[in-house]
Amino acid sequence: MLAKKLDQAGFQPLVIDLFADQDTRQVACDLRKVDSLAVEEIDPVINDLERLYSVKDVVYGSGFEKQIHSLFFLQKKLNLRGNTPEVFKKTQDKIGLFEVLSKYNISFPEVSFSRPDSGIWLFKPLQGEGGCGVFVDKFDDSSNQEGYWQQYQPGEVMSAIFLADGKGAEIIGFNWQWSVNLGRGQEFVFSGVCNQARISINNQQMIAEWVATLTAHFELRGLNGIDFIVSRNQCYFLEINPRPTASVELYSANLVAVHAGLASRKNILRVQCQGYQVIYAKADYRVPDMIDWPLWVQDRPKCNTIITKFQPVCSVVASGVDSDQVLSLLATRQKIVENIFQKET
């Protein structure tokens, strides 16, 4: 997504990526696939790209929640756009984050850093992303995973993306998002997002106040996102993402360039109602040599790639007059893609 947005804005992105799918190969000026985002993996790649292109700036996306030390490494090597590693680390400190929320009277479902005795609680990893590793604790095992518990709060999960300058922030849009249950330990994995959330004006104002408060406290910069739940017109904070989120896919082409300081925020364009949905494998698949991918398929895997059950296969996008039409299109397109792979198994 980052590479595509920069390409659409007229730049030539150099990409380091874990997947190196076909879409990324098409838009990248140069692409290097790595097995992880650990320093020892990205160090030689960065050195090579610096040698070939005299690159100075870097924009980072998801995947650094468990590799924060790599952000400190990147900061020493290049001009790191967006939040500093210090800010990123502070927002990922769950104990400190919930203390900040309490200080500013920002509502959130009750949390516990020791296993509760009863009730409906979600277990969440300390360094997680996209809902991976989140599940309802049935209190039927003695798991010693590192994480915390949060009381289950029913409602609609939403998010907001915003641009920050360290002191103030501008909300770019409110999104409605949903998850998929991939089995025990993966019950709330991010599945899709639509950039047209049904949220009241009062709640929009409340979220804007939360964003302003957190921006000033953490000195957030660039594109960020927060997730929250709306239940009976009450908002509950879930988490903060101190980096561009998946929902950026559904907004102006130059938004990442603005994040990187390469374009003016005055030129951010309004967009129509759009949706984005990740398709997860229902069985083990091998991507065939020849697939006639529809134009609305993104993140297309390389031919002969082995995709195991529950791994992401690709994603589909749709546009429409409203969220209902977009969701209907996404569901239809998901079935089309699943049918393609069922023929290959």
Image (cartoon, grey):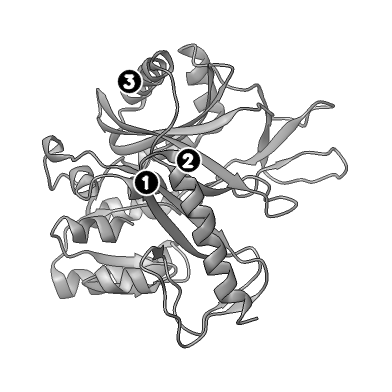
Which of the 4 image quadrants contains residue 221?
A: top left
Q: Which residue shows up at 19% across the image and 58% down it?
A: 8
Mark 1 vs mark 2, CA separation in Å: 8 Å
Q: Indicate which disc residue 212 carries.
A: 3
Q: Indicate which disc residue 324 carries.
A: 2
Q: Indicate which disc residue 305 carries.
A: none
Q: Which one is closest to the eye, mark 3 or mark 1?
A: 1
Mark 2 vs mark 3, CA separation in Å: 31 Å
Residue 101 x, y percent position in the rendering: 49, 19
Residue at which label 1 appears: 320
Compare marks 3 and 1 and give the one earlier in the sequence.
3
Label 3–label 1 contact, CB within 8 A: no
Q: Which one is closest to the eye, mark 2 or mark 3?
A: 2
* Residue toward you, 271 or 166: 271
Q: Is residue 27 left or right of residue 136?
A: left
Q: Is residue 292 left or right of residue 13?
A: right
Mark 3 vs mark 1, CA separation in Å: 31 Å
Question: What residue type is disc 2 on?
Answer: Asp
Task: State the SS at label 1.
Answer: strand
Q: Is residue 169 above or below residue 323?
A: above
Residue 67 x, y percent position in the rendering: 46, 53
Which of the 4 image quadrants contains residue 25?
A: bottom left
Task: State the SS at label 2.
Answer: helix
Which of the 4 image quadrants contains residue 168?
A: top left
Question: What residue type is disc 1 on?
Answer: Gly
Q: How many marks?
A: 3
Dividing the image into 4 quarters, which one contains the N terminus? bottom left
